[in-house]
């Protein structure tokens, strides 16, 4: 009997905070792969500081993906390819919203391929109702008391309201 190892993908990001757009990509990845590891970047390089700690961001995602049996969430602090090797992933899945996402992700995919040609990058287009959605936008909307209830899970909306002092 031929037993193949489970096909594992990682969905890395800062998730500060996780949005329904992120969760859509994670859910779609969970339908394509046997195992999906959501990698929460401990200290993102492109951002000065995060609003939520890595542990808080991890907890938000765990709560929102509790019904997805093949999804696990981990915090990582090293290079993406090192994290992929650590969890036996052969695929990196990222969501794309716009051309600006593509330009950055294309560069990252090339760098990751140079570091480990065995790890593939797959990009999933954001659904149209999430194509405008970003963590930064959600935080800005929350600061000004806009309704974000359809953009993030309820615990995230409550935490944003609490953290941003509404």
Image (spheres, rainbow, N blue to C red):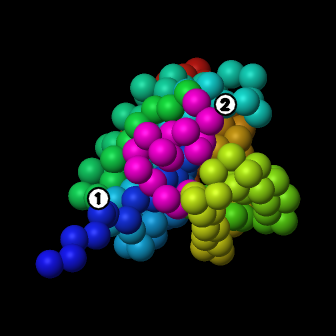
Please name the residue that numbered disc 1 is placed on: 70
> Which range is magenta?
78-92
81 in magenta = yes
Q: Secondary structure at mark 2?
A: loop
Within 10 Å of the Cα at label 2, are there few (<14), some (14-19), or many (20+) other Cα atoms? Answer: some
x, y percent for residue 49: 68, 22
Image x and y of residue 100, in percent:
84, 58
Q: Quadrant of the N terminus?
A: bottom left
Q: Which residue is found at the position 62% from the left and 25% from the top? A: 43
Of the pair 46 and 138, the residue shown nearer to us: 46
The residue positioned 33% from the left and 54% from the top of the image is 71
Nearest the viewer among 144 and 34 is 34
| Viewer-proximal residue among 108 and 97 | 108
* Numbered circle sitting on residue 44: 2
Question: In this rendering, would 73 be left or right of 119?
Answer: left
Q: Is residue 25 left or right of residue 51?
A: left
Residue 41 lies, with reference to residue 20, above or below; the image says above
Do we see residue 114 in this rendering? yes
Question: Which badge, 1 or 2, comes first in the chain's sequence?
Answer: 2
Above-or-below relation of 49 to 144: above
């Amino acid at each position: 009997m031929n037993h193949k190892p489970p096909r594992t993908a990682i969905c890395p990001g800062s998730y500060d905070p996780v949005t329904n757009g992120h969760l859509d990509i994670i859910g779609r990845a969970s339908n394509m792969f046997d195992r999906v590891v959501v990698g929460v970047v401990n200290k993102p390089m492109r951002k000065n500081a995060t609003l939520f700690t890595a542990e808080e961001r991890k907890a938000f995602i765990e709560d929102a993906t509790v019904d997805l049996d093949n999804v696990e969430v981990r915090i990582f602090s090293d290079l993406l390819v090192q994290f992929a090797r650590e969890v036996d992933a052969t695929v990196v899945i990222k969501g794309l919203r716009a051309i600006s996402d593509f330009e950055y992700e294309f560069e990252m995919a090339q760098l990751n391929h140079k570091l480990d040609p065995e790890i593939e990058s797959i990009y999933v287009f954001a659904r149209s109702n999430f194509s405008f959605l970003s963590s930064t936008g959600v935080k800005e909307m929350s600061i000004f008391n806009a309704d974000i209830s359809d953009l993030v899970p309820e615990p995230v909306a409550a935490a944003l309201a609490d953290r941003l002092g509404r």
